[in-house]
Amino acid sequence: MDNPTSRNVLFGTASALVANALSVPPARAQTQYVRQSIAEFSKDPAKVEGFRAGVRAMKSRGAWNATSWAYQANMHGVPPGTTLRPGWATCDHGTWFFLPWHRMYVYWLEQILRQASGDPNFALPYWNYADPAQRLLPPIFRQPADSSNPLYEANRRSGINSGTRGLAFADVDVRTAFAQDAFSSTSSPYAFGGYPRAPSHASGTHGALESSPHDNVHDAIGGYMHDINKAARDPIFWLHHANVDRLWNKWLSSRTHSNPTASNWLDQRFTFFDAQRTAVTESVRQFMSTRASEYRYDTEPAPTMSMTVAESSDLSIMGDGGSGAMATQVTLARSNRLVELGARPVSIPLAPTAPMGEPPEAPRQLFLTISKIHSKTPPGSSFDVYLNLPAGTKPGPDEEVYFVGRLSFFARMAQGDSHAAHDEGPSIRAFDITALARRQADAGAWRQAPAITIVAVYPEDIVEGAGARLGGIEITRR
Ligand code: C2O
């Protein structure tokens, strides 16, 4: 077929791509691949068949073949005690490399899958769970529900595979992430893209987008997905991460948002494998320009120029989170109690350290910050956090007066349980509770001596002895 979108792809061998990337403006060097929403993608049986054929072919390859499904999944993580092969267990969580590392990971998997699928135009679809009509696991991942379907995984939560339970709004909530103007900040955990520090495998303070929706969606799927050491074995992993990558672009489309310009971010290099099984070590910078211009999402306009990082931007990497913001931060109430989480709800009173007063008016903000979040192994559930919940009530996450947000333990393994040596950091999850506090004041529920209640989202799936715990809770005003 003389399809203009496939013409240049046909000579898109690795060497041609590299040559083009070096010598020709990317937008003219090759046709862009378009990542479609899974709802659109699934309407075309030929695309679905190509996707399935690619996954099937990768799954049939031996685990030591770098283009096999198992090898690629092991690059994300492996169970403790596994002998490591090149590139294994290198996923980045809890740092400002979370977004670029996973962008690179998805990009190279897509190259391998394209070749294995036999479809020269293949591009990974993404899962747009922001759309309430798309909160159930996409049908091609659960039907047929047997091993004839390479996209099916039997170990997901049963409601997920049966299509009777989907993602909740609390899982996919991006409001806190999109309210952040800074990609990274050394002075506060409330930034979009993660804390600026060296690459780290599975610990530390997660960025706002990483916390929600990213971590919550992993937990909601369950099975492999809620275990960092196995997550990428489930084919839905890749559609989830394509969507996280798309959300990064969406955040960047605001004029006031930009990526870090620091060279220790842009020049950080990571190693993956191409479809010829050759190790490729490239920098984050390449994925902000050349590589990023090779594909786009169907929600984005076809560009006439390549998408580039705002390299001339004078915004510092610290964004608005400089020391001035720290100086005006007041801790209003706190608990330093170590709390173990399990199937039963726990209630934690916070001791006032300054007058709570009335909820602040804009531009001041109130945050609830949970710190020292760790688990030895996946606890089997995420947890809902409530403020001032009256004793005896058990509202769901849709209620408006008490629900703070959802806490996930994905990629928050305690030191000694992950492979890379790392600095655990404070492992914080922060929630903006400014609007909630105002709703509580209106409802007469705002209290001078606040209390937090934490409730397992899937109490029936709790793993006893997983060691899920947190070591501090604070309410602060900025
Ligand atoms: Cu490295 Cu969604 O995980």
Image: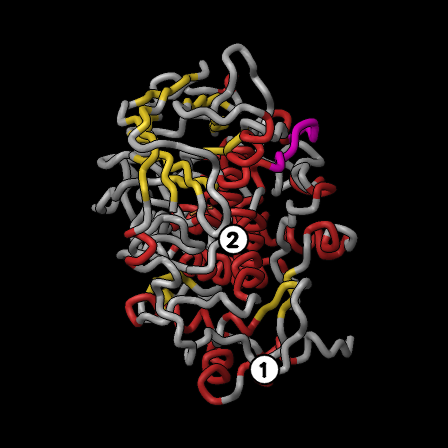
* Left or right relative to 316: residue 73: right
- Mark 2, other Cα within 10 Å: few <14 / some 14–19 / many ≥20: some
Residue drawn at point x = 50 percent, y = 84 percent: 20
Q: Quadrant of residue 425?
A: top left
Residue drawn at point x = 44 percent, y = 85 percent: 22
- Mark 1, other Cα within 10 Å: few <14 / some 14–19 / many ≥20: few
| Circle 1 SS class | loop
Residue drawn at point x = 51 percent, y = 88 percent: 24
Q: In terms of depth relative to the viewer, which is nearer, 113 or 89?
A: 89
**Main secondary structure found in the magenta portion:** loop
Sequence-earlier tag: 1 or 2:
2
Type of residue at label 2? Answer: Ala
Magenta span of residues: 161-169
Q: Which mark identifies residue 179?
A: 2
Tag 1 residue: 305
Return the x and y of residue 463 as percentages of the image width and height: 42, 20
Ligand 1 is within 8 Å of the C-beta of the residue at disc 1? no
Q: In terms of depth relative to the viewer, which is nearer, 359 or 149?
A: 359
Q: In terms of depth relative to the viewer, which is nearer, 182 or 87?
A: 182
Q: In terms of depth relative to the viewer, which is nearer, 205 or 446?
A: 446
Residue lying furthest bottom: 23
Return the x and y of residue 339 as percentages of the image width and height: 32, 22
Return the x and y of residue 301 as percentages of the image width and height: 67, 71
| Mark 1 or 2, closer to the camera | 2
